[in-house]
């Protein structure tokens, strides 16, 4: 077979070479993908992933066009679902409506007056209490990545977990912490 991958299209008797399929469908699939993703690089990656899945497919494909578009749609969805790691900064989004620009700056930068010190103490106590409410795996990933600045790849090697699992755990931690710390902020503002 000379390394060429064949698949079935419409009727089982019609075999097609992978090169013909790529040439026939690349432009249509790329147009489909571009409408749904924000960057050209992502579109190219998705298209490449679709064709890799086609090459790795071991089952006959009876309706090639439908199969390709279904796989493409799934790859786009997977790409969009990939969670970007949340940052501690995301917890402290400034709320312009309340004139709170610098909320995080108040806690982490200069200003050694008693009020600032009190706010820092309350913040760190609340953060520690909120971290202790988390499952140990979420807490540990958050502490390692955000507070100790250890990259996900290193954590993955250390724990044996996948990077995506670690990102997911950190995201749950950040959502919990965001909720708890926004309550603190509201309490301090209404005080």
Image (spheres, grey):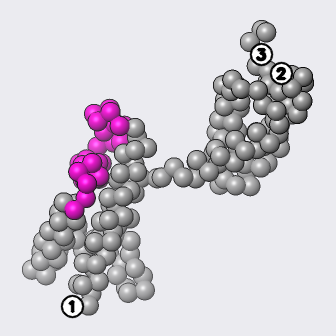
Q: Residue at x 90, y 24 (%)?
A: 14
Residue that protrudes farthest toward the top in the picture: 2
Q: Position of residue 136 (x, y in %)?
A: 23, 51
Compared to 72, does 5 lie above or below?
above
Q: Residue at x 76, y 44 (%)?
A: 69
Q: Which residue matches tag 2? A: 17
Q: Dots 2 and 3: beta carbons under 8 Å?
A: yes
Of residue 186 and residue 56, the one placed in the foreground of this image is 56
Q: Quadrant of residue 61?
A: top right
Q: Does the image show residue 177?
A: yes
Check the picture and name the quadrant holding the C terminus: bottom left
**Residue at mark 1 to residue at mark 3: CA–CA distance:** 72 Å
Mark 2 or mark 3, earlier in chain: 3
Mark 1 or mark 2, earlier in chain: 2
Is residue 107 covered in magenta? no
In this view, the mark in front (1 or 3) = 3
Q: Which residue matches tag 1? A: 191
Q: Residues within 10 Å of mark 2 (few under 14, many from 20)?
A: few
Q: Which residues are magenta?
A: 133-161
Mark 1 or mark 3, earlier in chain: 3
Q: Residue at x 86, y 26 (%)?
A: 12
Main SS of residues in magenta? helix
Q: Which residue matches tag 3? A: 4
* Secondary structure of the residue carrying numbered label 3: loop
Q: Residues within 10 Å of mark 1 (few under 14, many from 20)?
A: few
Q: Does the image show residue 40?
A: no
Check the picture and name the quadrant holding the N terminus: top right
Residue that protrudes farthest toward the bottom in the picture: 191
Q: Position of residue 152 (x, y in %)?
A: 36, 42
């Amino acid at each position: 077979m000379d390394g060429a991958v064949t698949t079935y299209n419409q009727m089982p008797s019609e075999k097609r070479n992978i090169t013909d399929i790529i040439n026939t469908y690349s432009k249509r699939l790329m147009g489909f993908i571009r409408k749904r993703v924000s960057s050209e690089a992502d579109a190219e990656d998705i298209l490449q992933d679709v064709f890799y899945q086609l090459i790795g497919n071991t089952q006959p494909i009876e309706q090639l066009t439908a199969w390709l578009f279904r796989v493409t749609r799934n790859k786009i969805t997977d790409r969009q679902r990939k969670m970007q790691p949340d940052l501690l900064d995301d917890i402290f989004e400034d709320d312009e409506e309340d004139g709170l620009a610098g909320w995080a700056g108040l806690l982490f930068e200069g200003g050694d007056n008693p009020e600032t010190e009190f706010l820092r103490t309350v913040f760190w106590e609340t953060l520690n209490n909120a971290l202790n409410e988390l499952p140990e795996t979420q807490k540990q990933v958050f502490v390692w990545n955000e507070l100790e600045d250890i990259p996900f790849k290193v954590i993955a090697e250390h724990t044996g977990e996948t990077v995506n699992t670690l990102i997911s755990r950190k995201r749950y931690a950040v959502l919990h912490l965001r909720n708890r710390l926004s309550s603190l902020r509201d309490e301090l503002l209404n005080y």
